[in-house]
Structures are given as C-alpha cells and as structure tokens.
Amino acid sequence: MTREEALEQLDDIGRAQAFGRHIGSDRLIRAGLDALLAGIDTPSLALLAGLPKREEPEAPALFDAVLDELGLRFHPPAHPVAAQWALATWTAARIFDGSRDPAAGAYDIWGVARELGYPEELQELVICAVNLDDWSDSWDVAHENLCAKAVEAARRYLAGRPVEELREARGC
C-alpha cells in the first residue's frame, strides 16, 4: 500500500465514522498498521497499530487522535438535511471511484433518499438499489450489468452537484 492509499483509507474510515457508521476496532488497528507500513508517522499511529487484543477498546480514541494529527478529521454539516446530502454525495463518489461496492453504496443512498423524502436527484440510484436488492439468478440481466448501471447513475448524480460539494465529498 502506498502512502497516498493509506492516507485515503484513513480518511475514508474517518468519514464513515463521522457519518455514523460503526467501524470495528480490528479494522481501525489494521488501517493504522497499513499506514505505519506505508511510511506515515504520527505519535498515536504506532500506538494504534500495535494495540494488543485486550486493549482493542482503546482503538477508536487512538484512531481519532491519528486523524487529528494528520489533519484528516471530518465534521459533516450540522444541519441534518445538509448532512444527508453530504452523505449521498460522498457515497456516490465512492461508488464512482470504485472504493464502494455499487450494490451496497446504492442501498446506502436508498436510505438517504428515504430520509430526504425521495428527492428527484437520487431517484436513479434508488431504482438501481431496488433492482440490485431484488436481483436473482433467474433474471435475464447480469448482476454486473446492474452494478455498472449504479456506477453510471452515481456519475450522473455527481455531475449535477456543485464543484465545492464534490471537493468536500472527496476531502480535497
């Protein structure tokens, strides 16, 4: 793993946590170890990467310290509606760049759309999520084709978002 990939992994996990996703201590420790092996060095990183099993409950606090030390701490918008839109944009960007499984990402966006009252901008991704969720081997369309449609739907959604929102979604 390169330094850039390790930083991206840390940022991605930090954003997932900021949006309310639970990330297990084992994954936080593994991300810390990946970063350490990629040449990243902060005071808390070695502590995180070397946590023994019995000290795993300390991983979230150490991971937060690593994010702070690297300047990667992300705070979603305070307003709940703005936070949901930020989550949709971040998830769509991950679908499009290949870092999130299209089916799982579309399903996540379906949940956001439900929270937002099913806005038009998210309808194509919701349709993809429904199709992927209902898909079975008996269908005459391959699962991979439905996933490709979700990636394309994410691209179209992102194309309609303001540039500053896209920068924020990818931490630029």
Image (cartoon, rainbow, N blue to C red):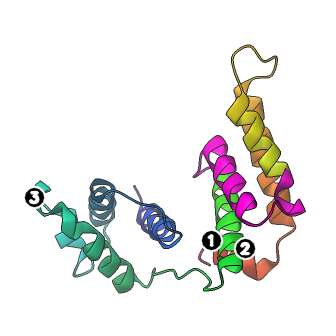
Give the percent coordinates (x, y) of residue 99: 57, 52
Q: CA distance from mark 3 to mark 2?
A: 40 Å
Image spot of residue 166 (x, y percent): 72, 73
User: Residue 39 falls in which quadrant of the image?
Assistant: bottom left
Label 1 crowd (10 A; few <14 / some 14-19 / many >=20): some
Residue 13 in the image: above or below residue 77: above
Distance CA(mark 1)–CA(mark 2): 6 Å
Q: Kindly identify which residue carries mark 1.
A: 170
Label 1 sits on what residue type? Arg
- Neighbor class of circle 2 (other Cα within 10 Å; few <14, some 14-19, many 20+) is some
- Residue 74 is one of the magenta-drawn residues: no
Secondary element at image label 1 = loop
Q: Identify the secondary structure beneath mark 3.
A: helix
Three-letter code, disc 2? Leu
Seen from the viewer's position, the closer of residues 2 and 72 is: 72
Q: Which residue is mark 2?
A: 166
Q: Which region is colored magenta?
A: 98-123
Q: Determine which residue is flagged by label 3.
A: 54
Q: Is residue 172 left or right of residue 36?
A: right
**Camera-nearest label, 3 or 1:** 3
Q: Residue at x 33, y 55 (%)?
A: 27
Residue 141's disc number? none
Q: Residue at x 71, y 77 (%)?
A: 81
* Depth order, front residue of 24/170: 24
